[in-house]
Image (cartoon, rainbow, N blue to C red):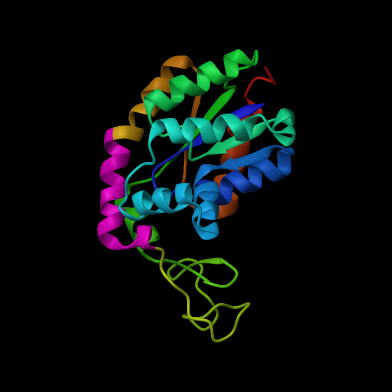
Amino acid sequence: MHVVLLGPPGVGKGTQGRRVAEDRGWALISTGEMLRESARRGTPFGLEAQRKMNDGLLVPDDVMIALVRERTGQEDAARGFLLDGFPRTVPQADALDRLLAERGSRVDLVLSLTASEEELVRRLTERRECPVCKRAYNLESAPPRDGRTCDSHPGVELTQREDDQAETVKQRFRVYREQTAPLIDYYRRSGHLREVHGVGTVDEVYRDLQSALSGAAGPA
């Protein structure tokens, strides 16, 4: 099964995608995590990608397509995969279709998480993480016990990612509206799109995702 998970910034794709992939035994291919890991390692590619993400911009299509081509060809992805963070543009979606067609396969299902921009801006600007273990928190919905330091690393102050700061968040939504939102129509025309309301508890949203998955076709 080859699944694409779409949605605006802050809608919960990372949390829900990891849970779906683990439960189904699929490879989780999160391009955002792959790019951030490259940046942490200090690779030239990773540092350049991080600069773009910090400015709320997308990494160039050709770079993302090469990254996904390599990752989807790995052994664990043969059992099925869930893509989080790719495609983000219609040219990337076209490239994904061609890549899978070369392998005699296709995208089986596209799950789109939805929520209002106002709600998501509030979520994003309240996100924090531990600089040691990278554990994620939200000061509004999932705060640390003392409100400011990591539960697992007492005394370590939580930090805010540069791409979660207010001005960058606004830029991320501008980019999403212009470049990524058209993917919804692209996949709706293909008949593979299932929209799921992304507001509610993590368990409530997950149940809705499971319902959408239950009506999908089997592996190509």
- Residue ID at (57%, 25%): 109
Magenta residues (range):
162-178
- Residue ID at (60%, 22%): 108
Chief SS of the magenta region: helix
Task: Please state the horizontal and vertical placement of residue 120, each as a whole percent of the image.
Answer: 36, 53
- Residue ID at (56%, 53%): 202
Q: Is residue 18 above or below residue 77?
A: below
**Closest to the observer: 209 or 51?**
51
Q: Residue furthest bottom?
A: 155
Q: Is residue 12 above or below residue 215?
A: below
Q: Is residue 46 above or below residue 181?
A: below
Task: Please state the horizontal and vertical placement of residue 200, each as a whole percent of the image.
Answer: 49, 52
Quadrant housing the N terminus: top right
- Do we see residue 201 in this rendering? no
Task: Please state the horizontal and vertical placement of residue 114, each as a whole percent of the image.
Answer: 41, 41
Left or right relative to 71: residue 23:
right
- Residue ID at (63%, 77%): 152
Left or right relative to 20: residue 90:
left
Task: Please state the horizontal and vertical placement of residue 47, each as a whole percent of the image.
Answer: 43, 54
Q: Is residue 198 above or below residue 70?
A: below
